[in-house]
Image: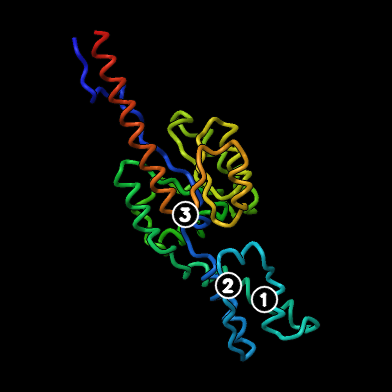
Amino acid sequence: MSLSSSSPHLQPPPLAVVCDIESLFVDRAAGVRLALDAVARSRGRRWRSAIDGSDLHQRSLSECLVEIAGDEADPALPALAERYWCEYTRHARFAAPLHRDARAIIERVADLGAEWHFVSTDGPEVATRLVRALGLAGQLSTVYTPQAGICRRARSALVENYIKCRPQPADAHLVISDELFEIVAAHRLGVPTLAVANGQTPVPVLEAIPLPVGVARTLDEAADWIEAQLLARDCLAASAARQQARLH
């Protein structure tokens, strides 16, 4: 009796790539710029500060608003902050584009047989609107989010809850993240993690901790790493099938 490599019980489940799509793949700095530009226009000013991804973690909103107002003692600063958050949450956030080549990377990984699972702390209305605005509805297997938005700092607990409720084994998942606590939470459950140097956690920190199976400095590197993992899984499955055939 022989078994082919296509035996169902020898085929590993699809690799489930779990991540926060907005954190990793969206140019959030562009959304911040749009909201700040709207605030500046409300003051009759043109404001074009060169904010990039690293500024999201190094500059404060108050600094930017003072720059727009021109005076740190301006009594209108609280109102400007309120205007900023209104613009960002209602419009600018959903107008921010994907990073260059991000769509091709998402499609490439999906074409290789992996699944994308989006974990968001923002609640179903925001998460669904974001997915639609990015045109990614057809690329995602699930969108996991609480019934109402919660603090982004709770994302690690949300990822942990999601993994626990999944029927697939831990090693059928891969968490890719730029957030240290999320990597720790996944590692605690035995889930492989790939750290992405996206600005949230300094690269030396990501490279110093022994928890992630790798550190990708770019999204392209992350896609290359996932492709290598999928190839390794296929090779292991084929090897197991050959061994099973020899045993019978």
Crowdedness of circle 3 by 10 Å Cα count: few (<14), some, many (20+)? Answer: few
Q: Earlier in the sequence, mark 3 or mark 1?
A: 1
Please tell me whether residue 167 is drawn above or below residue 107 in the rendered image: above
Q: Which amino acid lies under the numbered mark 3 shown in the image of this protein? A: Thr
Q: Nearer the viewer, residue 194 or 143?
A: 194
Measure the C-alpha gap from mark 3 to mark 1.
27 Å
Q: Do residues under tags 1 and 2 come within 8 Å of each other at their CB atoms?
A: yes
Residue 15, x across and y down, in percent: 39, 37
Residue 116, x across and y down, in percent: 40, 46
Dot 1: what SS?
helix
Q: Earlier in the sequence, mark 3 or mark 2?
A: 2
Crowdedness of circle 2 by 10 Å Cα count: few (<14), some, many (20+)? Answer: some
Q: Which amino acid lies under the numbered mark 1 shown in the image of this protein? A: Cys
Image quarter in which the N terminus is found: top left
Q: Which amino acid lies under the numbered mark 2 shown in the image of this protein? A: Ile
**The label number, if any, that marks residue 218 in the structure image:** 3
Residue positioned 44% across, 48% down in the render: 222
> Would you name the residue on which mark 1 appears?
64
> Would you name the residue on which mark 2 appears?
51
Residue 210, x across and y down, in percent: 60, 36
Residue positioned 53% across, 56% down in the render: 23
Q: Earlier in the sequence, mark 1 or mark 2?
A: 2
Q: Nearer the viewer, residue 19 or 150?
A: 19
Residue positioned 74% across, 83% down in the render: 76
Dot 3: what SS?
loop
Q: Is residue 44 left or right of residue 233?
A: right
